[in-house]
Image (cartoon, rainbow, N blue to C red):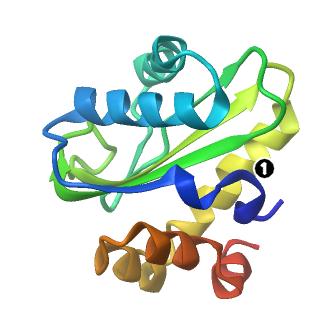
Amino acid sequence: MELADILSEDSVLACDKVKDKTELLDLLSRHAARVTGSEAATIRETLEAREALGSTGLGNGIAIPHGKLIGLQGVVAVFVRLARPVEFDAVDDQPVDLAMALLAPNGAGADHLKALARVARLLRTDSLVDSLRATDDPARLYALLTAPIASQHAA
C-alpha cells in the first residue's frame, strides 16, 4: 500500500488557526467528512474514542489519530500541517504540528494496521519531516508525502 493510495491531494491541509488538540481533531474530522462522505461528528467520536485509550501523539511533533468507521470502502488518510504546534498529550510531552488521521472500514484489520505502520515509519524520517515543516503549500506537502523517495523510507 502506497500513501498515494489512501491520501489524495485534496486531503492535505496547512492551517494556522488551530489552537489546541480539540480544534485539531475537529479540523481532521471535518476534512475527513468531506473526503469520505461520512458525518464529521461520527468521525470525531471515532478519533476521540481512540484518544481515550491513549494519545496517538508519537513524539517529535507528530500525531496519527486513527479509527474504524462503518461504511468506508477502504483506508483513507487526511494530513494537516499546523503553523503553530499544539499540546496533544504526546508520549514525549512535545506539542504536535504534523497530524495524519487514518480511517479504515470496520472490518479492515490488516489494512488498517499496515497503513498505520507505513505512516508511522514515514513520519519518523527526519529529512521528510524537516521538509514538511519547511512548507505550508498543500500541493508541496502532498508531493513530499507521496514522492517515491518517501515510499522507499516507509518500506
**Residue at (54, 54) in percent of width and height:** 10
Question: Is 111 drawn above or below residue 72 in the view shown?
Answer: below
Callout 1: SS? helix
Quarter of the image where one finds residue 118:
bottom right
**Residue at (54, 12) in percent of width and height:** 42
Return the x and y of residue 46 as percentages of the image width and height: 54, 17
- Left-right relation of 82 to 129: left
- Left-right relation of 105 to 20: right
Return the x and y of residue 133 as percentages of the image width and height: 31, 74
**Residue at (86, 22) in percent of width and height:** 107
Return the x and y of residue 66 as percentages of the image width and height: 56, 33
Quarter of the image where one finds residue 54:
top left
- Left-right relation of 94 to 2: left
Label total for image? 1
Determine crowd level at label 1: few under 14, some 14-19, many 20+ residues with C-alpha closer than 10 A: few
Quarter of the image where one finds residue 39:
top right
Give the residue number, with chain letter if any, for mark 1.
Answer: 114
**Residue at (83, 42) in percent of width and height:** 111
Quadrant holding the C terminus: bottom right
Question: Is 142 drawn above or below residue 150 in the view shown?
Answer: above
Question: Is 14 drawn above or below residue 113 in the view shown?
Answer: below
Q: Amino acid at mark 1?
A: Lys
Quadrant holding the N terminus: bottom right
